[in-house]
Amino acid sequence: MSISKHRGPADQRPSPGPRGWPSLATATGLILLAGLASVAPAHAARDLLTTRALSMGGALRAAATGTSAPLLNPATLTAARVYVMDTLYQFRSTDDASHFFAAIADSVTSTLGAALYYSYGNASPRRTLPQDGAPALSLTEKHQEHELGGALAVPLGEWLSIGVTGRYLHYRVDPPANAPSDALRTRLSRFTMDTGAALRLGEIFRFGVIGYNLIAVDDQLCPRALGLGVALTTGKALTLAFDSVLDFTSDPKALSATLHGGLELLAGESYALRAGAQHDTFLQASYVTAGVGLLSSRVGLELGLRQQVDGGTGTLISTAIKVFVQ
């Protein structure tokens, strides 16, 4: 959410943009059309979130404005007037994973909301491979992922908006040199899309719904899922958010889900305090989250933490720098 005073209230509609040069909305639209032209089946609800969203338990599908929107619900791009650039770095302890993310979101220069982003991730998960008549073999795989995405949102009146995110994913898994010759290698280069809607009732209640990976890819890596969210906002001071994501394909035998809850409290115009929790029924894992933000009219610095408290002990740390263009 854009939370510095120069960007105005969240219900203020974007004004028409300058003429004579392509807007971010135009560039994003061209990327989405290029992706559709190649429609091959690729990524879903996953660990990649902005620092703000992660700090709030991942619960922003009804209020994920700015650079959070293309990852959670593109329809919320038009919920606030903001033109922001965001860069972040994440580290996950369980598999020594690093993730880099850069994005730009604009709901000021056009009546449309638009966002572009790129992310790169690498990880080194450890596996144990049983062997007939020999001790189990311990392996460390190498995972790499590139993702390029764009999102567009259209306001339909004052209270409703719809949006779409298209993204192209390149994913690869390489076994180590000491792996058996038949060890699985994964290469995946695909395009997929999410579509969402956001509804605002009065000044307090916001609702969001989004379908993830509507172009089928991989049932586990990019599961078909439905996200539902509700948020309560009291001016700019307090945001409460509650989400659920229903996963239809990760478990072929049963429906699984993730449950999310979070809050954000703004202290004056310069400080944001965040906390949340998350539970994953497929992984049988629970997490608590927390974060802080230091904000000015032009720059924001953010730090977030997710700690696993059930089903493991993994830690994820996220840091971000935001630059508010307008």
Image: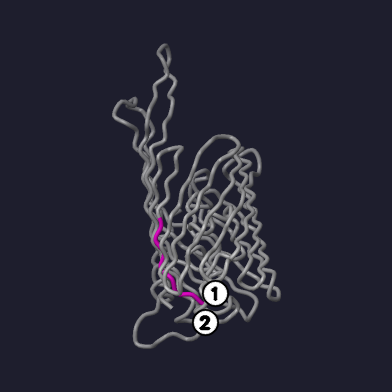
Residue 287 occupies which quadrant of the picture? Answer: top right
Residue at 41 percent across and 31 percent down: it is: 126
Residue in front for this viewpoint, 287 or 236 = 236
**109 and 55: which one is in front?**
55
Q: Is residue 97 left or right of residue 219?
A: left
Kindly identify which residue carries mark 1. Answer: 78
Camera-side residue of 298 and 280: 298
Quarter of image, res 18: bottom left
Please say if the residues under marks 2 and 1 sit with CB atoms less than 8 Å apart: yes
Q: Residue furthest front?
A: 268
Bin the neighbour count of mark 2 within 10 Å (Cα to Cα): few under 14, some 14-19, many 20 and up: many
Q: Main secondary structure of the magenta part?
A: strand
Q: Is residue 116 left or right of residue 235?
A: left
Q: How far separated are the C-alphas under marks 2 and 1?
A: 8 Å
Label 2: element kind: loop
Residue range highlighted in magenta: 80-88
* 322 lies above or below 245: below
